[in-house]
Amino acid sequence: MAADRRPMTTTRLSGYARLPRAYHASHIVHSMVDAHGRAHWLLAEEPPDRHRTDPYDALVVTVEDGRPRETRLSAVGPPYAVFDALPDGGFVVAAPRSEPGEDQVQVFDVLGRCSWTFRLGDGIEDLLVDFSGDIWAGYFDEGIYGDDALSAPGLRRWSSTGDPLWAHAPGPGHDDISDCYALNVGAEAVWACPYTDFPLLEIRGDRVVSARKNPVHGAGALAVHGDRVVFLGPYGDDRSVLVDCRLTGNAVEPVARGRLVRPDGTRLERRRTVCRGPRLYVQAEPFTEWTVLDLAAG
């Protein structure tokens, strides 16, 4: 993408959800904002140990409209995990790395009991549950180019019981995925921006309905609303850069560049993101608070 010499605007994130201080002594294994906008923290008493093989009990703290509630999960397997909430009140917990034949995914019911285990493949970069309860998994290069056929497509949709429902395949305007850099699972569509050419894929149902040519390369997060898309952290020295774009029928057209900052105006450093339709959720160290950029808010 060519350098843009126009002045950089500043966009402030808005506060969204906080982990109550009473839980700050616990270790945060992972945190997520689900399809319904509820914030969740997966907590353990001790930091993860990659050599640990014994299951452990964990606590999920859910914050909705400022009110917390607890769900205790029994016998969690992966010490390093990604997770998300299911529509029925349960949770899916997965290890990003796995070996063939190893069930890396656990599905817990609303009472915190493990009801299903299965495998999604090695090298999970993003795991997001949609409104219907299906699981979207985007994979990074080590999984895609390893010996694991489950990861090879780069982006897949699974049922909450581990049944394969859809897998990316090359088509007009989009080749094989080498790394699923950015994934947005919204209410009406799923959006992805994969390496190497970074087309903006729009997925509805079980097919890619559009693969727009995209000059914004390397972004790790995106939000979409109407004919507008913003990308966070494209290639460059400053990963807090926002690129505001307009969607046409077959292309992404950059309109402006800016910088995303914390609600108090300070610089974003190391952070996590979750992309849900028009909302870009951002969590910075120490990962006890979620903030949001909402394109639908105006």
Image (cartoon, grey):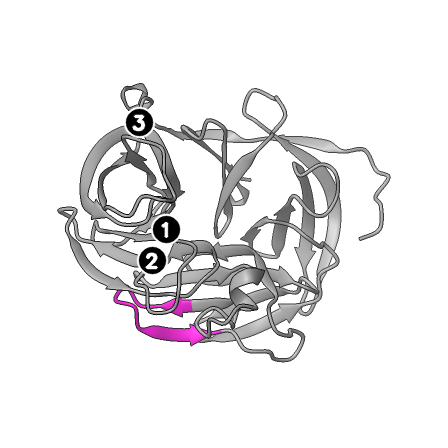
Q: Residue at x 60, y 30 (%)?
A: 269
CB within 8 Å, label 1 to label 2:
yes
**What percent of the width, then of the height, locates residue 83?**
35, 49
Disc on the earlier residue, 1 or 2: 1
Q: Is residue 71 magenta?
A: no
Q: Which residue is mark 2?
A: 131
Query: Badge 2: few (under 14), some or many (20 or more) residues near its Cα, within 10 Å?
Result: some
Indicate which label's residue lies in the foreground, 3 or 1.
3
Badge 1 amino acid = Ala
Q: Which residues are magenta?
A: 157-167
**What percent of the width, then of the height, locates residue 203?**
50, 68
Q: Residue at x 69, y 69 (%)?
A: 250
Q: Secondary structure at mark 3?
A: loop
Q: Is residue 160 magenta?
A: yes
**Residue 162 placement, left or right of 157:** left
Can you tell which mark lies on residue 262? none
Q: Which residue is mark 3?
A: 26
Q: Which residue is mark 1?
A: 35
Res. 91 in view: yes
